[in-house]
Image (cartoon, rainbow, N blue to C red):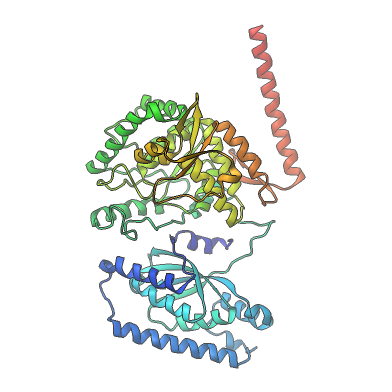
Amino acid sequence: MYVSDNKMATMCCLWLLDASLATDAAVAHFASQLQRQHQAQINDQYDDQVFDSEEKSIDHDLENEVESSESSEPSSDNDSDAGLTEEEVLLEKAASQDKDAEKAIQRATLVLRLREGINSLARVLKVIENGKGNVVHLESRPSKEQGVQFDILAKVDMTRKDLLALMKILRQSSTLASITILAEDNINVKNPWFPRHARDLDNCNHLMTKYEPELDMNHPGFSDKVYRSRRKEIANIAFDYKFGDLIPVIEYTADEVGTWTAVFNNVLDLMPKHFCMEYRNAFKMLQDDKIFTADKIPQLKDMNEFLKKHTGFTLRPAAGLLTARDFLASLAFRVFQSTQYIRHSTSPFHTPEPDYIHEVLGHMPLLADPSFAQFSQELGLASLGASDEEIEKLSTVYWFTIEFGLCKEHGEVKAYGAGLLSAYGELLHAVSGKPELRPFEPSITAVQPYQDQEYQPIYFVAESFEDAKDKFRKWVSSMSRPFEVRYNPHTQRAEILDSVDQLNNLMTQLNLEMLHLNTALNKLKMRSG
């Protein structure tokens, strides 16, 4: 989806609620869950009679509005546009000019600002449902606007006529401070939206929140208000971070350091036998640089400097688990978005979502390996401008490689996936002989269902990082994207190679590099001869 810069700034800071609301049952379940889990945050609740009364009133008005719009012709008078936003005026005119499009189901993106707590969203969803709308995507964040508690982004499938009627009714509701339709430009081959410069990653911070301690009752921190408050504090620091800012320093508590120490010592025990050579080498370098010690959690800024020195990868704070598209896009720029909060102390060896220990002990050492760093970046580059279906396949490949990948080393199977390197239970399961081990083939791996709640029943084994990269490149070449993208490290830009002039310039650069390589090779031969 592509939107104008000011609208993108609004959209990209919202939090993703991973809710599939295509059915009545899903809507009811989602609303019920939000009401129950945010009850402690609601100070001024309405009683059930008020809820029922307002809902019936809004539903009745909605029915009247739809009936009225069906029985009357659209007015050409300018007065008919009174009270409508620019987007709604265009929507109404388009509906009146194209009767076939008027009846077609289309997707609209709405921004709703709730005056009350999050449980009032249930009533809004019910009104949308009664207005023949199907909510397919929701995002939420606490609002910074005075008098507004939450900002909600909703993607709704419905006809233009029903959408206009819905907008007019929702504007009359005391539940909402405002409602806006976001204008969208169609993505096309010549103008796909994706981050073109590293600074555009400021817009790539959508979160998957189904594992957040406030929403997941199975999360070890669900009932721990102190832990949830700490998570929120660190998440807000990440949300405030912008391209070019200094990486914030987090003062970790003694409890958090104790959790780190337990996991760190566990990694030391398992590493010689089960971890790949590339990881072991990078781990030793981190120890030699005094960054990795058992009694101190490394700061993100120190890890950033270490990676920048070895492979050019940089780090930026993330507030939580990012959507696949946003996370993969970051890798294209050799940027790894990392959380900074620590898992709950009652569960040091398992976390339902990525935490800083997972990032530091699982991902970052291998990002210091040139071959692995290149593989990670190529995954990211392949995602730029890819379709949603291809993003799903790429994220699945990422899951079975960078998160839970195995590789061969001197005839033995070793772990290189971060989910294995930072969680000893899954690691021991992977090498126990119980799960099925398959050779890594991207076309097969990309469509393999995976487990995000339990141990994997299937793992994929790469012959080497180089072999994995070769197979991945061949597979990516068959994707539908009609252009090639390269990263220019000098300008920190992702460049679309879609013109002869661009290709000629690139060939000139490559010829210059080849000249340097040939010169170096000749000098080596002269010295050895």
Q: Is residue 40 above or below residue 69?
A: above
Residue pushed farthest right? Answer: 500
Horizontal and vertical percent position of residue 359? 40, 41
Quadrant where the image shows the C terminus: top right
Q: Is residue 149 left or right of residue 90?
A: left
Q: Nearer the viewer, residue 291 or 63?
A: 63
Residue 301 visible in the current orientation: no
State the residue in front, 437 or 93: 437
The residue lying at 55 percent from left, 43 percent from top is 333
**Position of residue 392 measured from the top left corner of the image (x, y, whole percent):** 55, 53
Identify the residue shown where x is 68% and y is 80%: 100
In the rendered structure, the answer to whether residue 439 lies left or right of residue 518 reads left
**Furthest residue in direction top, as rendered:** 529
215 or 336, nearer to the observer? 215
User: Residue at horizontal 66%, vertical 40%?
Assistant: 474
Location of residue 330 in the rendering, given as x and y in whole percent from the top left corner: 52, 46
Q: Which quarter of the figure has residue 207?
A: bottom left
Tally the numbered discs.
Answer: 0
